[in-house]
Amino acid sequence: GQFCKRCDFPLPGDELERSGAAAIWQSEVHAIMDEDDSLVFHRQLLMVAEGLGREDVEGIKFLCKDLIPFGRLEAMTTACEVFQSLMSNDILNQEDTFFIAELLYRVQQNYLLDRIGYTKEKVRENLHLKGKVSEFRQMLYELSQEFTNDNLSDIRFLLTPYLPKKQSNMSAIELLTTLERKGLLAENNLGLLEDVCGQVSSHLLTIIDTYKLKRVSLSIQESKGSAPSSVRKSSFEGVSLSATVEGRSIECSTKSLDSYSSLREHTGHVHSLGSNPGVNAENLVGASVQNFPSREQNDESRTAAEKSCTYKMDGPCRGHCLIFNNIEFGELLTQRKGSEKDAEELERVFTWLGLKVETYNDQTSTQIHERLKNWQSSENWKDSDCLVCCILSHGKSGEIYGTDAQLIPIRTIMSYFTASQCPLLARKPKLFFIQACQGEKTQKPVYLDVDVPGLLGADAQSAGVPPLQPSIPDEADFLLGMATVDGYLSFRHIREGTWYIQALCTELQQLVPRGEDILSILTEVNKHVSFRADPEGLKKQMPQPAFTLRKKLVFPVPREPPPSQQP
């Protein structure tokens, strides 16, 4: 017999067809299939929505501003509401989910793409054909992601006359949205934004310049060689395009304008201009912008030059994470309540990052030395990309305690893994995170405790004594993340864990998916911890990283969502 081309069900015979029952029967089968397909589609969207944080949703709403009216978007608080509106406007349907893939790609949540059947490479290949987010909207979102806190604070101050009162904490996206709503920012009205960005950061101005040059490039191509008078010279087969836009000379490689998915994908071609609008961009061909943070790029999209400046993190084994968690010190030192929370969180996060985690609880100084010596001679490092070692204990200046109350210098711990002592880890990054006090104890409220033993007394370095210079081994490729600067206390909540380790785990989960390098992440950890205080607001903490890294260290983005977003 015959079969339906859509559902492969056998078609009824001639007698049923003559009676018209075939059409009814087939219609009912297809209706059931449509319901099943719709359920699968909505389930996919729900899975995507569950993986998005608040900032991601705000970014997606901003990218949809040209497709959904402002008023409707402002009332939405969840990704599902945005998806529903897109479906209502026939922008999204179960036959074509590419726009969701584009949004995930642009907010750098690439690990969610496989939930709707895409990969980052597949999205990138189809953006120029199927992308719906305008160049203007891309540029504004890129700009919002590049604002540092200081940049944003300065820009808010400069724009005070144009912004609503009592909104001193307005985010970058909220600020740009306000300017658009007031008619002060549009595709052909960038003057005010250029002025304030030019006064704050030449890097921000470069993002706008690249967008404007892209528009010039497109207009030239559309005119088939009839260039507007504002263009001084162009060479589409060469390397550069120079133009005078609104009285300001700017220059950029045309290669960097071919695909404006991210300015950061083209840092080898974009030429940074000074903040003074009167400065001419001359003799800039071949120059390159340095120190641009990279969020979107990862191992697959980096150029050979970029890879040479980044540690290799694609070996057979990501590496090993060693966690020494000392809680019980008997009668010798105070119990470190809450430290188990830190150890659990570290294990979850570094497992998510692809490392094999080994946790050692309540180790004496002798046991710590023995463990480190065994790992020093391990053959596991041959195929490993890196070492991570986390020490959670009591401490004093430059040292940590074993559970036998014997001190071990931090420098000694790190020296087990120098290039000469552990050749298999030579030229590979070695990260040490130390959660321990580096000074004397101060009594804290009931829910706060300090990582300094109660019997130390005057043996702990006083905060009033000039701190020692931070020390790390002379050998290369080490990073030492200290919970506090030398001479001071670090704080631990007896139920929630320490300020430093919890901030470290939070920032790793938020920033690794965005492609941030480890030093940028630790800067955010510093900010996170520095904002905290005890209930009275009198006691603060300042972490301190030190390093001899020779390259950037960027953890590959895991396929799974961060532990904080997993059930």
Image (spheres, rainbow, N blue to C red):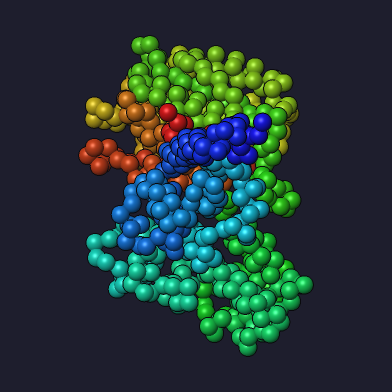
If the image is split into quadrants, where does the N terminus sit? top right
Most extreme residue toward the right is: 237
Q: Does residue 435 appear to the left or right of 351 in the view shown?
A: left
The residue at 55%/17% (across/down) is 368
In-front residue for pair 51/371: 51
Residue 502 vertical placement versus 104 (above, below): above
Most extreme residue toward the top is: 330
Camera sees residue 552: no
Q: Position of residue 124 (x, y in %)?
A: 63, 52
The residue at 48%/73% (across/down) is 187
Residue 493, image quadrant: top left
Q: Does residue 437 appear to the left or right of 474 in the view shown?
A: left
Q: Position of residue 457 (x, y in %)?
A: 33, 25
In-front residue for pair 232/345: 232
Camera sees residue 489: yes
Residue 89, image quadrant: bottom left
Q: Position of residue 379 (x, y in %)?
A: 72, 21
The residue at 64%/20% (across/down) is 375
Q: Does residue 454 appear to the left or right of 44 in the view shown?
A: left
Q: How many marks?
A: 0
Most extreme residue toward the left is: 536
If the image is split into quadrants, where does the C terminus sit? top left
Residue 167 vertical placement versus 8 (above, below): below
The residue at 65%/17% (across/down) is 374
Q: Position of residue 90 (x, y in %)?
A: 46, 55
Residue 301 vertical placement versus 185 (above, below): above
